[in-house]
Each structure stands twice: as C-alpha cells, then as structure tokens.
Image: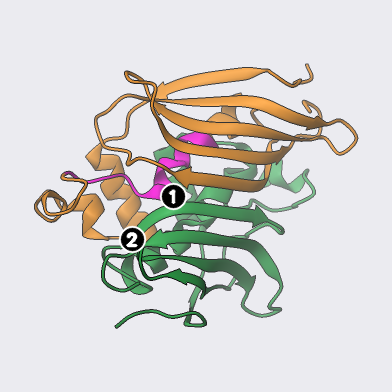
Chain colours: A green, B orange
Amino acid sequence: MLYSIGDTFEHEFTYTQEQVNAFAELSGDKNPIHIDPAYAANTPFKKPIVHGIFSMAVISKVMGMEFPGEGTVYLKQVVEFKRPIYMDTKYKVQTTFKEVNRDKHTAIVTTNIVDATTNKIHLQGEATIFHPTKI
Amino acid sequence: MLYSIGDTFEHEFTYTQEQVNAFAELSGDKNPIHIDPAYAANTPFKKPIVHGIFSMAVISKVMGMEFPGEGTVYLKQVVEFKRPIYMDTKYKVQTTFKEVNRDKHTAIVTTNIVDATTNKIHLQGEATIFHPTKI
C-alpha cells in the first residue's frame, strides 16, 4: 500500500512522571522543571512539564511502528512547542500526509500534538520522512 | 551573565545500544533498525542506528543543564538528519547563539551534531529558546 496526500492517523496517549523521570536519567537532562514539583510550582507552568524532546517520543513511535511503520527513515523535523505537555493528561498525535515525492519515496507529514479534550494545539510540526516501499 | 551572539558550547558524547534499547522501551518505538543488528545489516545503514528523536536527547541535556542551563524553555526546534548516528561512536554537540532578542528573552541557537573525528555534520539544526534571566 502506498500512502497518499491526505492520509491521516491519530493516536491518543499520556505521559507519566515515571516516564519523564526515566527520560531525565537516560538523557541526563535533569532540569528541575521536569522532575521537581516544588520547583515547577514557582514557574509559570505551575506543575512539572514533559521535556520538549521527550514529548516528541510518541511521534517517533507512531512513525516507526504504525504510520508508515517499520522501515521509516527520518530526514527532517520541525516542531514548535506552543503549549506545555503535562503528565497524566490525554493528548493526541495527529499526522497527515501533506506532500509526497514518489521518485524519492519521501513525504512531508504534519506531526501535531493536541489536547484530547480541548483539541488545542500543543506541539505543531512537520516531518520529512523516507520509506522505500510505502511512499 | 547574559548570553550574546557568538557564544558557543561544545560537548562530546557517545550513545550505547543499552541506551537505545531503553529509549525503545520508553517511547514504544521498537523499529528494528534501532535494536536488531541482523535486521540493520540488510539496510543501507548496515548497523543499528540511534532513533532520530533520541539522538536529540543530548541537545536537551546541554540546553537544560549547561547552556543556557536550568530555566531554559524550548520554543522551537528544526533538525535535519543528514547522516545516521551510530552507537559507540564519538560525536560532538556544537551550539552557538545566532540571534538574540533581549526584550523577549529569546534566542536562536544552532544545534549541530558532528562526528568528533571527521567533523562531518550528522544533525544540522537550530532551536529557539527562552530564558528569563540569561538571555
């Protein structure tokens, strides 16, 4: 099956403090805004927020495992962090094929993360990807 | 101390297969290109490669912990994955202040990852960041 412009995929998810702590250990980014509720309480965010880079992990999962899935190679990512991602809150990744180049087997797909309840955009972005057989 | 255009920071690092496996578990992105040497041998990469998103974890660490450090908020990231990042290979993050907006306390910093031996660019990107007191 070849993906075409307009093909879309949606996936609901939640990050937990436990996952964020694990990413802090793994990356070495122990900025207290992500892991210390007392520190975060004195920031405009009021509560710990997910690392920007880690909030994109779900985009990696969707593209590497499901849409387009195995064999996908990342060429480029643009992302704007428009609102914070909090733990224990339901969000959705929404990704849609926007441009397709059949000769090069590449595509530009939108990669947005929206609040699953309010539909407000928290991460707005797009990825350029390569897939040898599905694009 | 206020950061200014031209201020630069460099940090050498290596990713291990163990770290990549941990990120695969944490993110759910178990694309075999990252974790299965037999599968990777049959791809143009020949060996497992670090997840694109996870290869950016070191950028998160540098900005959240060292340059500018605690209090940094990510507003935007653009990244091109120009060459793969392999495990057990020495790379350097190179980040330099390119534009500074003192009124908004925001800056654009380059966020490149280069091979520490050859100096070839593997990830080429830039981040827009906010810091209330250091920018």
Residue where numbered disc 2 is placed: B29
* Disc 1 residue crowd, few under 14, some 14–19, many 20+, Cα 10 Å: many
For the residue marked with disc 2, what is the amino acid? Asp
Say whether residue B52 is magenta: yes
Earlier residue among tags 1 and 2 = 2
Question: In this image, B42 relative to B26: left or right?
Answer: left
Residue at the far left in the pictured view: B38
Q: Which disc number belongs to residue B53?
A: 1
For the residue marked with disc 1, what is the amino acid? Ile
Is B44 drawn above or below residue B101 in the view shown?
below
Residue B33 % position (x, y): 23, 54
Name which residue lies at 40% across and 48% down: B52
* Disc 2 residue crowd, few under 14, some 14–19, many 20+, Cα 10 Å: many
Q: Is residue A29 visible?
A: no
Quarter in which the C terminus of chain B is drawn? top right
Residue A41 % position (x, y): 74, 48
Question: In this image, A27 relative to B128: left or right?
Answer: left
Q: Which residues are magenta?
A: B47-60
Q: Is residue B15 visible?
A: yes
Say whether residue A47 is magenta: no
**Answer yes or no: do the residues labelled 1 and 2 have beta carbons within 8 Å?**
yes
Chain ID of residue with mark 1: B
Residue at the far front in the pictured view: A103
Q: Alpha-carbon distance for marks 1 and 2?
A: 10 Å
Chain ID of residue with mark 2: B
- Classify mark 1: helix, strand or loop: helix
Quarter in which the N terminus of chain B is drawn? top right
The reply to whether label 1 and label 2 mark residues of one chain is yes
Q: Nearer the viewer, residue B105 or A134?
A: A134
Residue A59 % position (x, y): 46, 63
- Classify mark 2: helix, strand or loop: loop
Is B25 drawn above or below residue A107 in the view shown?
above
